[in-house]
Image (spheres, coloured by chain):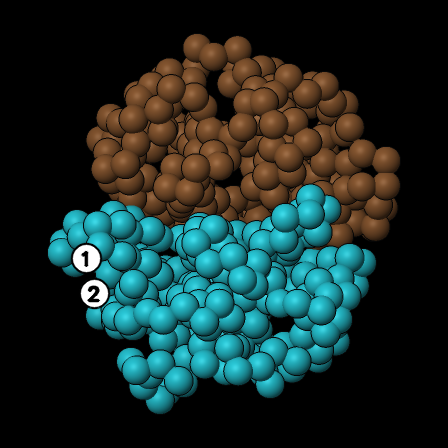
Chain colours: A brown, B cyan
Amino acid sequence: MELHSFFNSSTSYRVRIALALKGVPFEYVPVDIRTGEHRKEAYVAAVNPSGAVPALTEGEFSLSQSLAIVDWLDTRYPEPQLIPAEPEQRARVLELSLLISCDMHPVNNLRVLKYLDTVLKVTPEQKSEWYKHWVAEGMDGVERLLSKYGARPWCFGEQPTLADCCLVPQIANALRMGCDLDVYPTSMAVYRHAASHPAFQAAQPGRQPDFVAP
Amino acid sequence: MELHSFFNSSTSYRVRIALALKGVPFEYVPVDIRTGEHRKEAYVAAVNPSGAVPALTEGEFSLSQSLAIVDWLDTRYPEPQLIPAEPEQRARVLELSLLISCDMHPVNNLRVLKYLDTVLKVTPEQKSEWYKHWVAEGMDGVERLLSKYGARPWCFGEQPTLADCCLVPQIANALRMGCDLDVYPTSMAVYRHAASHPAFQAAQPGRQPDFVAP
């Protein structure tokens, strides 16, 4: 099994956490999205028709979209289950994961920031404000959901779930971009807890073979 | 059961299709996101802590995020199942649904277009180019995925799935915004097929009680 990944891609980071939690061995295939490797014809034809990372491949099988990959891994490698089966807990885990994956991450990912730079020619201050605005919008909701429905030490209790696989990379990115997250104590408690877990450590950008220091 | 919805919200539209396909009766609660009703304290406290539509409520239970809602409906009302159980088919349905829900819709939704207008003060032409750019990026991937893995008349064969619940509102929005989608014949074939289906018709923006003609 191969994971096509970029060290700093937070969607790749989600899948790396899931694979590490499940202890599934895989080959790391670096795809440099800064130089557009994910858009090259060979990659689009053989790995991911939608031209993005991450993608999981195994023989002829290939799958993209981090949440679809984690769902698929849950079927193939059910221990530990990252998307709970119990309907209400499942609903909460998916709700938080989708809030991060749909409403927070896409508006601030590399291709959007590049468009702001190269097409709209915004100033660095405008770009930073954009980033922080959408992080704050999303984190307000994340913090409220976790406070209302969650339980520590993870997002939803004693075991890490897909929600933690989504929250940790999102917070890591936001911290890297200089966002102030002290106003989200519940979310930050989960983040700090994850920092001491071997699977979450193994998935960190700095531990990947294609890591380049900023 | 109540669906908190805005007629022109394509994420609400997804859930309306799912409810109609399953024949689940529900009360329609209009939330005018143009005037910020989704951000009011009462709505955030009682309905959706993340302050958005759609949200499904039933007694004390409340759930947001369209894909989480459809997953939950599949457990409660399994006929017809919109997220297939068979692993490979399930993976394809989730992959396409997430491509639309994460990579296409969020970058072009109302709050982002408003930010472009009011904060970045882009021109109407720049806003239109922005919209069309992300639709083209996403639809290129959608069309390739459908051509490689799909089967007609729906996205993935003889029965509509979550993928169709996501594709149809996305295409409807793109057409409304003047995008040329003739270059995506496979996606458009699915869209035209859906147009003749009663559940897809019942979920259309023009059929909702809060509809206002443009």
Which chain is indicated by disc 1? Answer: B
Pick the residue in front: B155 or A66.
B155
User: Which disc number belongs to residue A8?
Assistant: none
Q: Residue furthest bottom?
A: B213
Is B7 placed left or right of B36 in the picture? Answer: right
Q: Is residue B41 visible?
A: yes
Q: Is residue A32 left or right of residue A81?
A: right
Image quarter where the C terminus of chain A lies is top right
- Disc 2 marks a residue whose amino acid type is Glu
Q: Secondary structure at mark 1?
A: helix
Q: Residue B43 has which mark? A: 1
Give the mark nearer the N terminus: 2 vs 1.
Answer: 2
- Kindly indicate the quadrant of the structure image that contains residue B32: bottom left
Residue at 78%, 28% (x, y): give it: A1
Residue A208: percent from left, percent from top? 64, 19
Q: Decide: is B74 above or below A190.
A: below
Q: Amino acid at mark 1?
A: Tyr
Q: Nearer the viewer, mark 2 or mark 1?
A: 1
Q: Nearer the viewer, residue B83 or B111?
A: B83
- In the picture, the disc for residue B37 is 2
Residue found 57% across the figure and 48% down from its top: A111
Q: Is residue A39 shown left or right of residue A16?
A: right
Q: Position of residue B133 (x, y in %)?
A: 59, 65
